[in-house]
Image: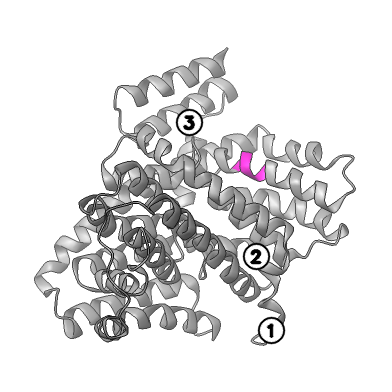
Amino acid sequence: MTGILILVITLALLVIGVPLFVVLGVATTLCFWLLEGTPLVIMAQQMFSTTDSFPLIAIPFFILAGAIMINGGIARRLVNFARSIVSWLPGGLGITAIVACMFFAAISGSSPATVAAIGMIMLPALLKEGFSENYSLGLLTSAGSLGILIPPSIPMIIYGIAVGVSVNKLFIAGILPGLFIGLLLAVYTVWTQRHSKAERIPFDLKNIFHHTVQGFWAILLPFLILGGIYSGKFTATEAAAVAVVYAFLVEIFIHKETKITDIPEIFAQAAMNMGTILIIIAIAKSFSQFLTIQMVMYDIPSLVTDHISSKWAFLLALNILLLLVGCLMDIISAILILAPLTAPIAKTLGIDPIHLGIIYIVNLEIGYLTPPIGINLFVSSVIFEKPIFKVIRAVLPFLLILLLGLLAVTYIPDLSLFLVKFYKGF
């Protein structure tokens, strides 16, 4: 009865337009207070410890890098470069958004940062060219989720530490699945927009060359970030700081589209966006702590794996489990709690731990788009200033595509492992 009361209060707050972080905070507080009877100081301590995290530092840095790129020319030049390649296709601007998200994901490694940086540029452009608001919101929110699958990826680092596997191998393993899911989104866009009257720019090598030259410094950034990580020069978190410095130097001294006097406003803009996102992440982590106290996450694996001896049945059960967990927990907590419990079982069934890691990432990537803890849903709602329920409805068709991608990643191991077999850098 108490749980139903909490659910009713949460829905009522959403309906009357209370800010999202307040709604999540109230719901989590009620869970601790009414269901567990735990001192609320534990919730506050959990929120503090969440933000006092070295890997989490990467997100503010990438958000700041994105703000600098948006106010300058890097993000726009990435978009123009992508558009010059794919804009001859039906729904070309939508495919441009997907390609731009994939490029930016290779810079940021963060889904929220990708949604924020590319979304703020692409949403007005998509709407201006006649794409529906639902399609545009759903596409940008969903394509932005590729940020944790295309390397570098903070959740991959967390999984590698939790299970004891090579992070470099995980990064390599994420490339083909990321490209494959991006391709699925592009095919869906071509199909749904085949009769669209949106402008299509003829394929032109001179135009591609022009935008390659114009966007050279923007295109170079992903290679700088990935090269630095793979060579061991810096960690993913340090790469985020490098991205900020690089973006600053390029925009101020090369593109000259940003002035020194613009920097305080850019910092303020990034701080406002990141402040909202950090509060949501901290509260989501507290809710995860509540589930941990209740021992929910420790009971589920045994329920799923009892009496399962088939590799394929285990993978199906694991996917169902992770999709459920993705709705309820933040990705880092889910990995830290579940990966060490399920990895030994998977190993006994002959499942490669690298393959298992990519299955985790794709499942929890979908979790970014499913309520009540779907971080990208909240980020989109804040960035695009749209009601959360509208964003959820817009994302639904794209969720089906991501689920199709999940099936392929799960049951075609070589999609994850093919490149790993040829990687000699470890």
Q: Residue at x 35, y 46 (%)?
A: 137
Within 10 angstroms of label 2, few (less than 14), some, or many (20 or more) residues? some
In the rendering, at what x and y percent does residue 197 appear?
27, 53
Q: Secondary structure at mark 3?
A: helix
Q: Which residue, given by chain and number where applicable, does mark 2 sit on?
A: 161
In this rendering, the answer to whether 385 lies above or below 184 is: above
Going by the numbered disc 2, the residue's amino acid type is Ile
In the rendering, at what x and y percent does residue 341 appear?
76, 50
> Could one spot residue 330 in this view of the protein?
no
Q: Secondary structure at mark 1?
A: helix
Going by the numbered disc 1, the residue's amino acid type is Phe
In the rendering, at what x and y percent does residue 291 appear?
61, 35
Query: Which badge, 1 or 2, is on the more N-terminal residue?
Result: 2
Task: Select label 3 or label 1 by which is in front.
Answer: 1
Q: Which residue, given by chain and number where applicable, does mark 3 sit on?
A: 28
In the rendering, at what x and y percent does residue 216 appear?
30, 84
Looking at the image, do the residues carrying marks 3 and 2 touch, with CB atoms under 8 Å apart?
no
The answer to which quarter of the image holds residue 37 is top right
Q: Which residue, given by chain and number where applicable, does mark 1 sit on?
A: 422
Query: Which badge, 3 or 1, is on the more N-terminal residue?
Result: 3
Tell whether 239 sits left or right of 129. Answer: right
Dominant SS in magenta: helix
Q: Residue at x 53, y 20 (%)?
A: 34
Q: Residue at x 48, y 47 (%)?
A: 398
> Could one spot residue 179 in this view of the protein?
yes
Is residue 324 covered in magenta? yes
Going by the numbered disc 3, the residue's amino acid type is Thr
Q: Which residues are magenta?
A: 321-325
Is residue 393 covered in magenta? no
Q: Secondary structure at mark 2?
A: helix
Frontmost residue, 218 versus 187 = 187
